[in-house]
């Protein structure tokens, strides 16, 4: 959770796509790799953001492996 500039709604759907980055020097691979790891363990990443308020990233894990 942060209190930064937030992420515009039109960009939220692209977060985690390969080579999409909000950073000038970013590769756009970090969150994609994290997402694949979480999904491999049957988890889910949720991103909530409000411009000029900040962003919260929530990682939900299953209660047990299946």
Image: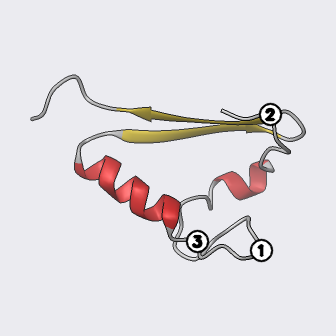
Identify the mark at residue 51; answer none if there is no mark.
Answer: none
Q: Is residue 36 left or right of residue 2?
A: left
Disc 1 to disc 3, C-alpha distance: 10 Å
Q: Which residue does the numbered mark 3 point to in the structure image?
A: 28
Identify the mark at residue 3; answer none if there is no mark.
Answer: 2
What residue is at 81 percent from the left and 50 percent from the top?
8
What is the crowding at mark 3: few (fewer than 14 residues within 10 Å), some, or many (at least 20)? some
Disc 1 to disc 2, C-alpha distance: 20 Å
Element class at badge 3: loop
Q: Position of residue 34 (x, y in %)?
A: 41, 55
Identify the mark at residue 24; answer none if there is no mark.
Answer: 1
Image quadrant in which the N terminus is located: top right
Q: Position of residue 26 (x, y in %)?
A: 66, 73
Element class at badge 2: loop
Task: Kindly check if marks 1 and 2 are in contact, taking CB atoms under 8 A apart as contact.
Answer: no
Q: Of discs 3 and 2, which sits in the foreground?
A: 2
Disc 3 to disc 2, C-alpha distance: 22 Å
Task: Kindly check if marks 3 and 2 are in contact, taking CB atoms under 8 A apart as contact.
Answer: no
Q: Indicate the quadrant where residue 23 lies.
A: bottom right
- Which of disc 2 and disc 3 is earlier in sequence? 2
What residue is at 86 percent from the left and 41 percent from the top?
51
What is the crowding at mark 2: few (fewer than 14 residues within 10 Å), some, or many (at least 20)? few
Q: Position of residue 14 (x, y in %)?
A: 62, 62
Element class at badge 1: loop
Image quadrant in which the C terminus is located: top left
View extreme (right): residue: 52
What is the crowding at mark 1: few (fewer than 14 residues within 10 Å), some, or many (at least 20)? few
What residue is at 41 percent from the left and 63 percent from the top?
33
Q: Is residue 13 left or right of residue 9?
A: left
Q: Position of residue 60 (x, y in %)?
A: 39, 31
The image shows residue 53, relative to residue 19, as above or below, that is: above
Q: Is residue 64 left or right of residue 3?
A: left
């Amino acid at each position: 959770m942060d209190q930064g500039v937030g992420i515009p709604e039109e960009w939220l759907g692209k977060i985690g796509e390969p080579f999409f980055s909000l950073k000038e020097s970013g590769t756009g691979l970090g969150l994609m790799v994290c997402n694949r790891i979480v999904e491999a363990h049957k988890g889910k990443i949720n991103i909530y953001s409000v411009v000029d308020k900040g962003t919260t990233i929530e990682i939900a894990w299953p209660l047990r492996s299946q």
